[in-house]
Image (cartoon, grey):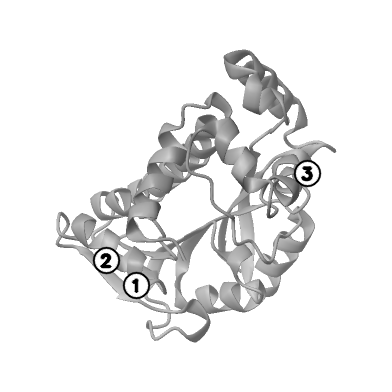
């Protein structure tokens, strides 16, 4: 388990990386989710929940956008790190809670955010079913998770292997940690689990073209190529190559 210092280093690395591709991959996801949270807030939703807030990237947005914000995590280090954020927002409550055994009240939240979490649960279907019980009848679920066969996840199987990860750290010159992904889903599997949990998908998006070598050594030129390929792949037969799949869903 990473220390709180490691957590902060990782957060800074992902969104402020010296590597253009790494920085773009994570900022794209962050910006899409922030936009959806604000869109839901404009629609009048007042009570928001984030399941598995991790390093707390979205906590400020949740607190600033909704009347009441609750954020849960199972990791005590994450909770301690987020305490400084919660101190700035009286309407933000942090709780230690496991979504699979949640003590939160049913139908209590107008918006539930779950970003880059269900891939860490062997029982992602159970986690989605629990979120369905927590969401209000007119609520919205904002979900993101990696695509199982995306080029980045395939590359990670090699890059994060023992004996290789230290080389990757030298190449990037930044903090690199193992992902901890144990349950990567294809778009088809994710859509089926969302539906089985009792949700109906309103919107789908994908992002994150990654090209080995071009990403590590191509700089801004490599990023321009990846952006072009991403636009070509999104929504088509090559969509599976893109790293992250996003959904906005509502109770069916």
Q: Nearer the viewer, residue 9 or 223?
A: 9
| Left or right of residue 79, residue 180 in this image | right
Most extreme residue toward the top, as rendered? 221
Give me the residue at 24% from left, 68% from top.
Answer: 93
Q: Pointer 1: residues within 10 angstroms few (<14), some, or many (20+)?
A: few
Image quarter of the C terminus: bottom right
Determine which residue is flagged by label 1: 76
- Give how far apart the Cα atoms at labels 1 and 2 are: 6 Å
- Give how far apart the Cα atoms at labels 2 and 3 are: 36 Å
| Left or right of residue 46, residue 245 in this image | right
- Give how far apart the Cα atoms at labels 1 and 3 are: 34 Å
Determine which residue is flagged by label 2: 80
Q: Nearer the viewer, residue 71 or 73?
A: 73
Rendered location of residue 48, percent (x, y): 35, 63
Give me the residue at 38% from left, 61% from top.
Answer: 3
Circle 1/circle 3 CB separation < 8 Å: no
Residue 83: name its quadrant: bottom left
Label 2 secondary element: helix
Label 1 secondary element: helix
Circle 2/circle 3 CB separation < 8 Å: no
Closer to the chain start, of discs 1 and 3, is: 1
Q: Nearer the viewer, residue 169 or 245?
A: 169
Most extreme residue toward the right, as rendered? 237
Closer to the chain start, of discs 2 and 3, is: 2
Residue 113: name its quadrant: bottom left
Rendered location of residue 118, percent (x, y): 59, 65
Rendered location of residue 234, percent (x, y): 72, 34
Q: With respect to residue 224, does 105 lie above or below?
A: below
Determine which residue is flagged by label 3: 240
């Amino acid at each position: 388990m990473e220390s709180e210092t490691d957590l902060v280093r990782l957060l800074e690395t992902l969104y402020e990386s010296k590597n253009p591709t790494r920085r773009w991959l994570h900022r794209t996801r962050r910006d899409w989710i922030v936009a959806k949270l604000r869109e839901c807030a404009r629609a009048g939703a007042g009570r928001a929940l984030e399941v598995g807030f991790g390093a707390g990237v979205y906590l400020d947005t949740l607190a600033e956008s909704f009347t009441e914000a609750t954020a849960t995590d199972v990791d005590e280090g994450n909770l301690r790190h987020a305490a400084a954020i919660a101190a700035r927002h009286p309407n933000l409550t942090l709780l230690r809670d496991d979504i699979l055994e949640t003590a939160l009240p049913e139908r209590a939240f107008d918006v539930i955010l779950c970003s880059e979490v269900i891939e860490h649960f062997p029982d992602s279907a159970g986690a989605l079913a629990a979120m369905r019980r927590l969401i209000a009848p007119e609520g919205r679920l904002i979900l993101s998770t990696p695509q199982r066969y995306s080029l980045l996840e395939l590359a990670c199987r090699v890059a994060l292997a023992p004996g290789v990860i230290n080389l990757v750290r030298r190449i990037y010159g930044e903090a690199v940690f193992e992902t901890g992904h144990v349950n990567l889903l294809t778009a088809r599997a994710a859509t089926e689990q969302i539906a089985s949990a009792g949700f109906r998908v309103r919107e789908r998006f994908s992002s994150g073209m990654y090209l080995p070598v071009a990403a590590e050594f191509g700089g801004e030129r490599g990023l321009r190529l990846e952006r072009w390929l991403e636009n070509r792949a999104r929504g088509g037969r090559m969509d599976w190559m893109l790293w992250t799949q996003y959904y906005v869903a509502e109770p069916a």
